[in-house]
Image (cartoon, rainbow, N blue to C red):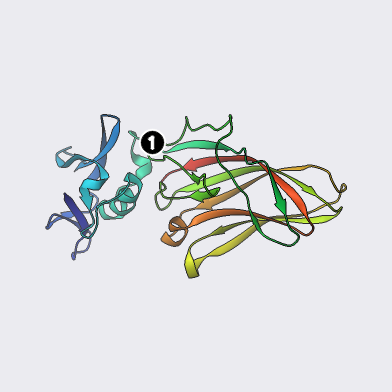
Amino acid sequence: MVTIQASSIANMFNKDGVDYPTGQYTIFYEEIDGVLEVGIRDLHTKEVLVHPQPPNQYSNGVDPYGSIASLLTDLSPLLGFNLAESAALKTHGFIDYNDTTGSVSLADDTWVDVPNNGAGAFTNKTYKPTLVNELIDVSTGYLDFTDLTLGSQIIVRNDFTITPNTNNSLLEVRYVLGQGAGEYALKFWSERLDSGSGINYQRVISFPIYMGDINTKGGPGKLQVKLSTNGTLVNAGSYINIQLR
C-alpha cells in the first residue's frame, strides 16, 4: 500500500513518510490485463517514484481509494499535476443514455424526477473518456459524478416530450445538485405550452454542470420537471459531453 498525503512543509507532498517537492512529479499510466493502473515518476528524469498500481493500492493515510477518479482528485493538487496534460488519457468524450421507461404521469404543480434506464437501443458508451465508466445511475435516472475529477465539467443535452392536459400550461425544468444541507436547485427552463392541450411538445435542452467542489461532486444530479396542470412525460434520453480536468 502506497500512502500519499499532504506534507507539513509548504510546496511538498508526503509519500510513505518522506517529503517530495510539488511540481517535480507527474502521473503516468499502464494498462495491465485490461485494468488501468497509476504510477508516479519524475517529470524530467522519468525516474519512477511509484510503479503502476490499481487505485485500491493507494491510501490517503485513512482509507484506500475506490476509483482512479477519486485518487486523481487528491493527487492532482498534491503533485501539481493537471489531468488534461496527460496524453495517455482520453479526457474528452461523451455518453448517450437512451431511455425506454415510457410515459410518466405529471401531477399539477409537482416536481417529478425524469427517469433514464439507459436500456434503449441508441445508448452509446463507445466514446467516453478513459477514466469514466458511468455518468447516470440507471436505477434512478440521476447523474452520478463519482468518475469525474474536481474541475471537470459536463454539458447535458436532454430530450423529452411533454403532453399537457390543459392548454397554456407552464413547464419548468431544473437540476437539483449537491447533498444534504448543501443541496441546491438550478431552474434553467420555463415556458408556456400554448399550442393546445393533448399535443406532444418535444423539448431538447442543454445545460452545463461543473465539479467546482465536493458538495456538487458528491451528490447526485436530479433532472426534474414541473407542469402547472396534469400531463405526461416521455423521456428519450440524455447525451452527456464530458471534459475531464
Residue 168 placed where, x, y %? Answer: 85, 54
- Name which residue lies at 76% across and 60% down: 108
Choose between 207 and 133: the one closer to the eye: 133
The answer to which quarter of the image holds residue 40 is: top left
The answer to which quarter of the image holds residue 169 is: bottom right
Q: How many marks?
A: 1
Choose between 109 and 216: the one closer to the eye: 109
- Name which residue lies at 79% across and 42% down: 200
On the picture, is 115 further left or further right than 18? Answer: right
- Circle 1 packing at 10 Å, graded few (<14), some (14-19), many (20+), is some
Which residue in the structure is indicated by mark 1?
130
Choose between 226 and 5: the one closer to the eye: 226
- Name which residue lies at 12% across and 58% down: 17
- Name which residue lies at 61% across and 40% down: 237
Residue 73 placed where, x, y %? Answer: 34, 52
Mark 1 lies on a secondary structure that is loop
Residue 40, above or below 177: above
On the picture, is 11 further left or further right than 122? Answer: left
Residue 239 placed where, x, y %? Answer: 57, 39
- For this orientation, the residue located farthest to the bottom is 181
Residue 14, above or below 128: below
Residue 4, above or below 235: below
The answer to which quarter of the image holds residue 116 is: top right
Residue 16 placed where, x, y %? Answer: 13, 54
Q: Amino acid at mark 1?
A: Thr
On the picture, is 42 further left or further right than 105? Answer: left
